[in-house]
């Protein structure tokens, strides 16, 4: 793989301008001869055909002619319909029999807008329906050679594969032997993790831990064996839990923010990191604690100041000394802020997200999302409100991109992009939809990484106000799945809530695990992501087949095709599903034999995803399903915030359903998530 700065190619860009003029009839010729480009061979599936599509150039200027060549293998087809972009402009392409199938070419003009331009073809052949997809990157940046692609302002020769590569993972949340024990550790979810030398330093809810990178498991293994974690409980700092963490590697300091709960204070704590990262690895040492009644959330460390997002509506300014001592310099209450969450800084400003929770019941006409606040820190010890803008959802994480652009994680609404050239009037430029709920963002060297609950998504930020999806993954371990070994050791991310990105790669924290990985620029491939990794099933009383829809998405940049691996018990009437980049779809399956001793435990899918060509859907079998009027199964949950007159019991008590029902207590069940 080779790469060069895109700005070093002005000569070819001038050549393109001349071609555009000729194509538009501005010169002596009225048309440009169609260049001879070789399309990749198409693929013949059982009952369907994937057309091979080549485009030239792969990176085009707005309005530039783009040549498209299409190959349909081993089939007879007279015409195909080309659909260009979301507006759905169509062109009929005549196909000729050659190249062991049919070949067709056409030239279309690139649209005015920048970003990915999705081209698709469809039609009918004697081998079945024909579908094909391709992407063209439309940009106003100086161009690349015809056979090159551009990402992060770099021209590079594309290769086959995935950009997001997992290099290791570790299970942090190891359940206690006795959950009822007074000192049982029930909440050990990783909240944040950063590279420090050859270790990971993490906030693991009730502890600060250091994990050697060498102890992370091979990504092809299940990663369920806890490695050496040198940790110290947050109680050493007089606090119960941590929410966020920053690392100062030069001074060997970790600084943790604590929200506080159950009537207990939160605050700030500093920790000395081990000087040596060789075995036996030493745990961090507590240095100092600063408490706050309402608690802290986000942190950002500048050269000489630490800024903290303090509940509910404050920004705190601290000085952190080399010995870890904490000095509060200023406490700034931000007008209009209701539920502060994250904070970031550049040379002149602070950027603060507001999740937007308040006691007001909003009407349909009122804004009910969050906010982005911009604070002027020309006086670093006294930041002052400069501007504010509405976000589309409950804003949490944020990242500062190049060219005065701020990306905000707006939960289920996606990613908001703001223009902050005028900090007194931040303006939302675009909102990028995501499949789930975005909570954390990280930016580095032209790339934006987003934690979106069940996937981590990688975007190119080269074109201002536009995010191009380069890759996304749930980092499942299904590469080990076969028909003889159908169970996945790791089904995929759950509640991914933190990402960091540096030259060394990325770090992810999800519900139970911390993972590391690296970026592989220039790689393109289909990527199968499952919406339905597991399904709870019960044998129908009538003995009829059980029908299920398996939902999926192509998170790659090349066409994806998926088929069901049929067995005696699992069958389908569907043709292979062909999905273009970013498209979603579903396949229907019929299941029998759920009442048999050898009942099926998985549904296997085969695809052209190069990392996981076989994916599995787990079938969780229950003896009978539930309907209205069914008895709810018994359960018990810890009771939190059980405080009367401001006094909270020290030990956590449990709520048991059957105990409540036995004394006639009414029950209202409400599900919520703090992620």
Image (cartoon, rainbow, N blue to C red):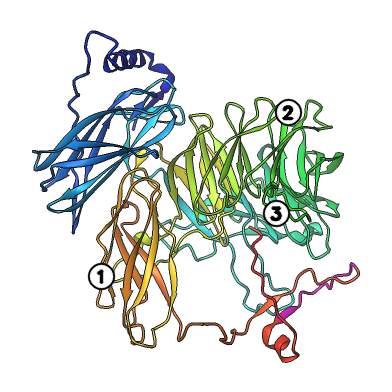
Residue 93 pos. (x, y %): 20, 36
What secondary structure is found at the residue carrying circle 1? loop
Q: Nearer the viewer, residue 372 or 25?
A: 25
| Residue 345, image x, y percentages | 69, 34
Which of the labelled discs sits on residue 243, or is there none? 3
> Tag 3: Cα neighbours inside 10 Å, few (<14), some, or many (≥20)?
many
Dot 1 crowding, Cα within 10 Å, few <14, some 14–19, many 20+ = some
Give the Cα separation between the discs numbered 2 and 1: 60 Å
Quadrant position of the C terminus in the picture: bottom right
Q: Which residue is labeled 2 in the image?
A: 424
Left or right of 618 in this view: 598 = left
* Quadrant of the image occupied by residue 617: bottom left
Q: Left or right of 463: which side holds 635?
A: right
The residue lying at 41 percent from left, 43 percent from top is: 163
Q: Can residue 271 be seen from the camera position used here?
A: no
Q: Which residue is mark 1?
A: 566
Asked whether the residues under the numbered discs 2 and 3 touch, taking CB atoms below 8 Å apart as contact, a structural biologist would say: no
Q: Quadrant of residue 360?
A: bottom right
Q: State which region is magenta.
A: 646-655
Q: Is residue 104 left or right of residue 666?
A: left
- Distance from Cα at disc 2 to Cα at disc 3: 30 Å
In percent of width and height, residue 297 lies at 73, 50
Question: Which numbered disc, 2 or 3, marks the residue that appears first in the sequence?
Answer: 3
For the point 39% across and 84% down, the residue is 540
């Amino acid at each position: 793989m080779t790469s060069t700065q895109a700005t070093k190619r002005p000569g070819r860009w001038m050549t393109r301008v001349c071609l555009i003029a000729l194509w538009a009839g501005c010169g002596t010729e009225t048309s440009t001869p169609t260049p001879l480009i070789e399309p990749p061979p198409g693929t013949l599936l059982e009952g369907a055909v994937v057309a091979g599509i080549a485009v030239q150039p792969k990176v085009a200027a707005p309005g530039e002619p783009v040549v498209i060549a299409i190959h349909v293998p081993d089939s007879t087809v007279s015409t195909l319909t080309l659909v260009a972009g979301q507006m759905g402009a169509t062109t009929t392409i005549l196909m000729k029999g050659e190249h062991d199938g049919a070949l067709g070419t056409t030239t279309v003009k690139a649209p005015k807008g920048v970003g990915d331009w999705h081209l698709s073809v469809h039609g009918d052949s004697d081998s079945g329906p024909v579908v094909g997809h391709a992407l063209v990157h439309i940009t106003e940046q100086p161009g690349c050679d015809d056979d090159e692609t551009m990402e992060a302002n770099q021209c590079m020769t594309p290769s086959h594969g995935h950009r997001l590569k997992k290099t290791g993972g570790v299970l942090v949340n190891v359940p206690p032997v006795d959950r009822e024990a007074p000192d049982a550790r029930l909440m050990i979810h990783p909240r944040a993790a950063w590279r420090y030398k050859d270790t990971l330093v993490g906030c693991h809810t009730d502890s600060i831990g250091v994990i050697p990178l060498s102890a992370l498991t091979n990504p092809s293994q299940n990663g369920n064996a806890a490695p050496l974690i040198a940790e110290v409980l947050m109680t050493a700092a007089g606090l119960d839990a941590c929410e966020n963490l920053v690392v100062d590697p030069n001074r060997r300091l970790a600084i943790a923010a604590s929200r506080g709960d159950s009537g207990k204070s939160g605050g700030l704590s500093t920790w000395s990191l081990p000087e040596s990262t060789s075995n036996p690895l030493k745990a961090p040492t507590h240095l100092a604690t600063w408490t706050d009644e309402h608690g802290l959330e986000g942190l950002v460390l500048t050269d000489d100041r630490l800024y903290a997002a303090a509940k509910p509506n404050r920004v705190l300014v601290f000085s952190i000394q080399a010995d870890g001592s904490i000095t509060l310099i200023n406490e700034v209450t931000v007008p209009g802020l209701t539920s502060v969450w994250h904070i970031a800084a550049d040379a002149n400003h602070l950027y603060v997200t507001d999740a937007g929770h308040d006691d007001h019941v909003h009407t349909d006409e009122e804004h009910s999302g969050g906010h982005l606040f911009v604070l002027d820190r020309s006086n670093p010890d006294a930041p002052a409100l400069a501007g504010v803008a509405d976000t589309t959802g409950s804003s949490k994480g944020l990242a500062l991109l190049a060219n005065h652009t701020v990306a905000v994680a707006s939960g289920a609404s996606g990613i908001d992009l703001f223009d902050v050239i005028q900090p007194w009037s931040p303006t939302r430029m675009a909102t990028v939809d995501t499949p789930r709920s975005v909570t954390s963002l990280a930016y580095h060297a032209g790339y934006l990484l987003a934690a979106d609950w069940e996937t981590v998504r990688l975007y190119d930020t080269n074109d201002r106000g536009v995010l191009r999806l380069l890759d996304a993954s749930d980092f499942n371990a299904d590469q080990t799945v076969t028909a003889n070994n159908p169970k996945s050791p790791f089904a995929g991310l759950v509640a991914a809530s933190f990402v960091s990105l540096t030259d060394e790669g990325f770090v992810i924290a999800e519900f139970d695990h911390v993972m590391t990985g690296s970026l592989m620029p220039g790689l393109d491939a289909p990527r199968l992501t499952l919406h339905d990794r597991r399904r709870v099933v019960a044998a129908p009383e009538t003995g009829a087949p059980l029908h299920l829809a398996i939902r999926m998405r192509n998170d790659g940049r090349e066409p994806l095709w998926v088929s069901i691996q049929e067995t005696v018990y699992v069958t389908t009437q569907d043709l292979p599903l062909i999905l273009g980049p970013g498209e979603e779809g579903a396949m229907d399956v019929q299941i029998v034999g759920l009442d048999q001793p050898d009942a099926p435990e998985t549904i296997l899918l085969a695809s052209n995803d190069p990392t996981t060509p076989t994916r599995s859907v787990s079938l969780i079998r229950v003896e009978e399903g539930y309907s209205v009027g069914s008895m709810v199964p018994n359960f018990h949950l810890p009771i939190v915030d059980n405080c009367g007159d401001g006094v909270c019991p020290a030990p956590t008590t449990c709520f048991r359903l059957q105990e409540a029902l036995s004394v006639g207590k009414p029950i209202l069940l409400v599900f919520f998530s703090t992620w």
